[in-house]
Image (cartoon, rainbow, N blue to C red):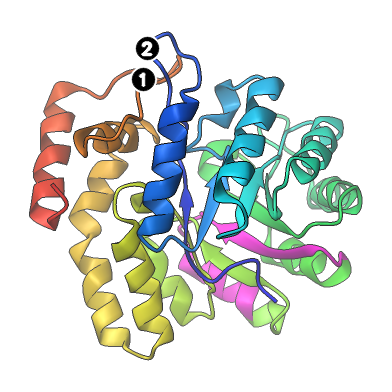
Amino acid sequence: MSIFTGAGVAIVTPMKPDGEVNYEAFAKLIEFQIANKTDAIIVCGTTGEASTLTHEEHLECIRFCAKQVNKRVPVIAGSGSNCTKTAIYLSQEAEKAGADGLLLVTPYYNKATQNGLFEHFKMIADSVKIPCILYNIPGRTGCNMTPATIVRLCREVENIVGVKEATGDISQVAKIMALADGCVDLYSGNDNQIVPLLSLGGKGVISVLSNIAPQQTHDICQLYFDGKTAESCKEQLRALELIDMLFCEVNPIPVKKAVNLLGMDAGTLRRPLTDMEEANAAKLEKAMKTYGIL
């Protein structure tokens, strides 16, 4: 059984002006998500600025999120690293903290061969009991996991259940699903490709857009699952202008600005990320108004 189907939010980590995690604001963001039909919460991913959290902060965010959610929807914790030993530590601690599943990014900077990727992910998954979703995003990591490796991991390692596919390469995604024969739960890692990946047998999306439009992103998936493919496609296309603006600067710079524009307190960004440029912020605000959420 899949960890979740539909739209899971890659939730932002709200920060106070001094850069500390704002747990009061975090609780409000979590409640907003659940009230607006999010299907899962993915905590401490790219959008959650995991790369600039200390290990202690990282694990406390997972603990806090799991406690606040209290099993109302699945909580999936980012616990990947380019160091296998570190990823095992974070994954085991995330499991203790109450995560229902893990999201494991490919090693970055040092990269790995396909055999190295297999060993890396197998060692992490074998160290925990909860299900794991692989995360392939070569545009950030410089490391592309091939369809054959993804399918081998899902087939041979019991608790590796799927992949967040963010290559943007539909041909590669199709190859995964052709090889998988049902053993891979596929999630889009790109908000502008939800429907295309659902059409190849996808289970949903791990979404940045959901931070500001959880109901609408859920609906794109649900309409498709209900057989209303034309309506689902229409909603996907209607969101494209806003999605483009959410990625006009490095994620999560625009989405944190968008959350703030909605009157919720995402706060500031940790360096090296800086506030959104004014011209882009104005275009983002316009896109949010056109989309009907502002």
Q: Residue furthest bottom?
A: 227
Q: Quadrant of the N terminus?
A: bottom right
Q: Position of residue 110 (x, y in %)?
A: 73, 30
Is residue 265 toward the left or the right of residue 105 in the image?
A: left
Residue in view at x 65 percent, y 66 percent: 3
Q: Looking at the picture, which amino acid does disc 1 mark?
A: Thr
Quarter assignment of residue 141: top right
Residue in view at x 41 percent, y 17 percent: 16
Give the foreground label among 1 and 2: 2
Q: Are marks 1 and 2 in contact (CB under 8 Å)?
A: yes
| 109 up-or-down from 75: above or below | above
Residue 217: assigned label: none
Quarter assignment of residue 269: top left
How far apart, in angstroms, are the residues tagged by discs 1 and 2? 6 Å
Residue in view at x 23 percent, y 43 percent: 245
Q: Nearer the viewer, residue 32 or 92?
A: 32
Residue 107 part of the magenta-drawn span: no
Q: Position of residue 95 (x, y in %)?
A: 78, 46
Q: Secondary structure at mark 2?
A: loop
Residue 17: assigned label: 2
Asked whether residue 114 is in view, the answer is yes
Q: Secondary structure at mark 1?
A: loop
Residue 164 part of the magenta-drawn span: yes
Residue 268: assigned label: 1
Residues shaded magenta: 157-177
Q: Looking at the picture, which amino acid does disc 2 mark?
A: Pro
Q: Nearer the viewer, residue 223 or 154?
A: 223
Q: Within 10 angstroms of label 2, few (less than 14), some, or many (20 or more) residues?
A: few
| 238 up-or-down from 82: above or below | below
Q: Earlier in the sequence, mark 1 or mark 2?
A: 2
Residue in view at x 28 percent, y 77 percent: 233
Is residue 215 toward the left or the right of residue 171 in the image?
A: left
